[in-house]
Image: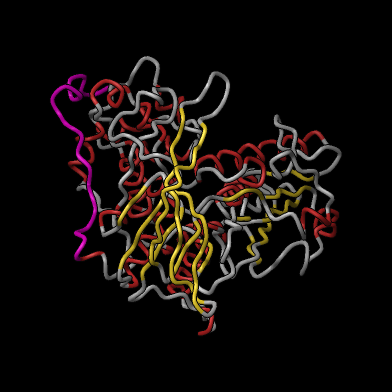
Amino acid sequence: MGNPKAFLTIHRQEAGYRPVHERIDDFSEVEQTLNSSDRRTQASRCMDCGVPFCHWACPLGNKQPEWQDLLYKGKWREAFHVLEQTCDFPEFTGRICPALCEKSCVLKLSCDEPVTIRENEAAIVEAAFREGYIRPVQPVRNDKRVAVIGSGPAGLAAANQLNRRGYEVTVFEKYELPGGLLRFGIPNFKLGKNIIDRRIRLMEQEGIVFKVNTMVGSEVSAKEIASTFDAVCVAIGSEVPRDLPIEGRNLKGVHFALELLSQQNRILEGIAIPPKDIINCKGKKVLVIGGGDTGSDCVGTANRHGAASVTQIEIMPQPPVGHNPATPWPLYPQVLKTSSSHEEGCIRRWNLASVRFIGDKNTLKGVEVEEVEWLPAKEGSRPEMRKTGRTEVIEADLVFLAMGFIHPEQEGLVKELSLAVDTRGNIAVDPATNQIAGTNIFASGDAVSGASLVVRAMASGRKAAAAIDQYLRDK
């Protein structure tokens, strides 16, 4: 702890976003960064707590106090080497992680000014790329081969760890380019795809083989892969979206959120979309159903299309601002989150349940919604929703369903390999090893846990890689 009084005299300083009038016309990243001097000053605020709750809260077990101190002292290279011990891709988490570490920072809990851990992390890894601290590693090979199915954060982390351990790794990806939902789910204004490309190039230089446009379980036999590779890591994500099967669901203009988000990312990649399939919000009244991050991403995308209006509705009540006594630490704070997309223009409403989609000649015109009330939870139960009977119609030309994801796709690979699923529809594995009993198959990420955070998927991929390594060593 180089400056033991910094937390008393220096306030938290965030880099903030580009001005709305500037960013609303493009898909470039909205977040800015501080200069190196200010970044070091922010790192000096870390108190190097005796019990570092930031480290405890991080699914990856990042050693934040250690690399904060090195950053404060100007030892950027050493800071990166500490960071890379636990995090394979700080350039991803430093941009899109909700920073569970900051929610547990003692300065957050005591005065609501946590250390800028996430931004510092991004600054360290960008300096490492810029200064050439990151170079391809050529591991000593052990003549064993591992297949990774899926190239989202879990699959990439597993592939990276296995490759560094000397395995010959082949990653199978069903989409046109590697990255999974990092590439085709998260908008470019949050995560520029050049950042993914830079990492993929590095992994290829280190010997990892990526086979794209390859759907395992239909175009390629999953059983053949399992028999020809020494081990397999299944990291197919949890991509089946939660639907809203109410009257009018099949009207033209009702889409899942990822139909918009993945299509927009493909357009920016230069991938051709059939004209009849293009979703364009320009001049349209847009309604987003679902109040989470995916819904926020739809808001930002619709704004950039030039939508006439954007409304986002949520069935749950509006959370409080700043602090929620119902979710004290160490629970994740359920507080009102205003994203960069919301700042760009959006009507937000809560306690609304969708009743039916209203159309004319098979084209969406609006959505009937009903106000609901939430009764306090009784002991051992969940809050109870009660309908009020108060209804209204929200005019809409386009609706995007952003209500989360329920489980991985259960046809194809899962069906061919006869993989067991749990009560939630996720792939069932040994919780200690992520192994599917009696096989050389392991699973990781959202396919096992259900839809969760990128940082948790990466942690799961690292866990699966370690278990595969131990399995093949024992074998």
Please tell me whether residue 40 is drawn above or below residue 105 in the rendered image. Answer: below
Q: Which residue is found at the position 35% from the left and 49% from the top?
A: 349
Image quarter (top left, top right, bottom left or bottom right) of the N terminus? top left
Coordinates of residue 100 in the picture (x, y in percent): 41, 34
Q: Nearer the viewer, residue 338 or 169?
A: 338
Q: Is residue 230 something that shows in the picture?
A: yes
Q: How is the image coloured?
A: secondary structure
Taking the image as shown, residue 69 lies to the left or right of residue 239, namely left
Please tell me whether residue 240 is drawn above or below residue 25 in the rendered image. Answer: above
Coordinates of residue 218 in the picture (x, y in percent): 78, 66
The part of the chain drawn in magenta is 1-21
Q: Which residue is found at the position 45% from the left and 34% from the top?
A: 374
Asked if the stretch drawn in magenta spans residue 17, the answer is: yes
Q: Is residue 292 something that shows in the picture?
A: no
Q: Nearer the viewer, residue 391 or 344?
A: 391
Please tell me whether residue 464 is drawn above or below residue 418 in the rendered image. Answer: above
Q: Which residue is found at the position 44% from the left and 71% from the top?
A: 365
Residue furthest out toward the left: 9
Prevailing SS of the magenta stretch? loop
Residue 316: quadrant of the picture: top left
Taking the image as shown, residue 193 lies to the left or right of residue 213, namely left
Coordinates of residue 64 in the picture (x, y in percent): 38, 30
Coordinates of residue 176 in the picture (x, y in percent): 59, 70
Residue 44: quadrant of the picture: top left
Residue furthest out toward the front: 389
Residue furthest out toward the top: 50
Q: Nearer the viewer, residue 397 or 204?
A: 397
